[in-house]
Image (tube, rainbow, N blue to C red):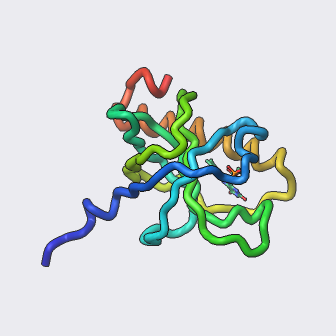
Amino acid sequence: MESNAEKNRYIAGKVIHGEGRGKKIGFPTANIDFTDWHYQTGVYGVRVYVNDACHYGVMNIGVKPTFHKNASKNVEIHIIKFNENIYGKQIEVEVIFKVRDEQKFNSVHELIRQIKKDIAFTKHKFHQMGMNRKELS
Ligand SMILES: Cc1cc2nc3c(=O)[nH]c(=O)nc-3n(C[C@H](O)[C@H](O)[C@H](O)COP(=O)(O)O)c2cc1C
């Protein structure tokens, strides 16, 4: 039987506008127009291929329970050390490891604190895996 494992590690889609909250809370995210739900909700360490370059990022697949009761599932990525406008661009995301489950936080402040930890953990893990590229430090 042919394995789909390799193929399923990739998510590709167009970058669309989110609710615009990410920038305000200090973590701009690329929201992706993606509806093939192979992945469970959660936070993941990812590699992002955009404009022919490889970057690192932290992806949340989820329903943002801190802000919504009944939102549909959504994919968004904070790309580390990245500050380009990529709305409308097609990007490819390679899922490398899971960081944690998505949680409902009691305040935006707590969510921000956790996302900072997620980014630190993800950088550390990529370093451990031998990925010491300038996009990480
Ligand atoms: C690394 C990362 C982890 C996240 N974890 C959670 C989470 O555990 N719970 C949650 O409600 N939202 C989580 N979010 C989603 C944020 O709520 C979301 O990025 C923010 O509301 C901005 O969304 P917007 O770009 O659609 O405005 C996470 C986002 C990122 C980038």
* Screen quadrant of the N terminus: bottom left
Residue 12 place in picture, x, y as percent: 39, 55
| Residue at screen point 71% across, 46% down | 114
| Residue at screen point 35% across, 56% down | 10
| Residue at screen point 55% across, 58% down | 75
Q: Residue furthest right?
A: 107
Q: Quadrant of residue 55?
A: top left
Q: Residue furthest front?
A: 88
Q: Is residue 89 left or right of residue 104?
A: left
Q: Is residue 26 left or right of residue 33?
A: right
Q: Residue furthest left?
A: 1
Residue 97 place in picture, x, y as percent: 43, 52
Residue 93 place in picture, x, y as percent: 40, 49
Above or below, 30 relative to 103: above
The foreground one among 53 and 114 is 53
| Residue at screen point 50% across, 34% down | 124
Residue 108 place in picture, x, y as percent: 83, 49
The foreground one among 116 and 52 is 52
The foreground one among 130 and 28 is 28
Above or below, 4 relative to 119: below
Q: Quadrant of residue 102?
A: bottom right
Above or below, 10 relative to 133: below
Q: How many marks?
A: 0
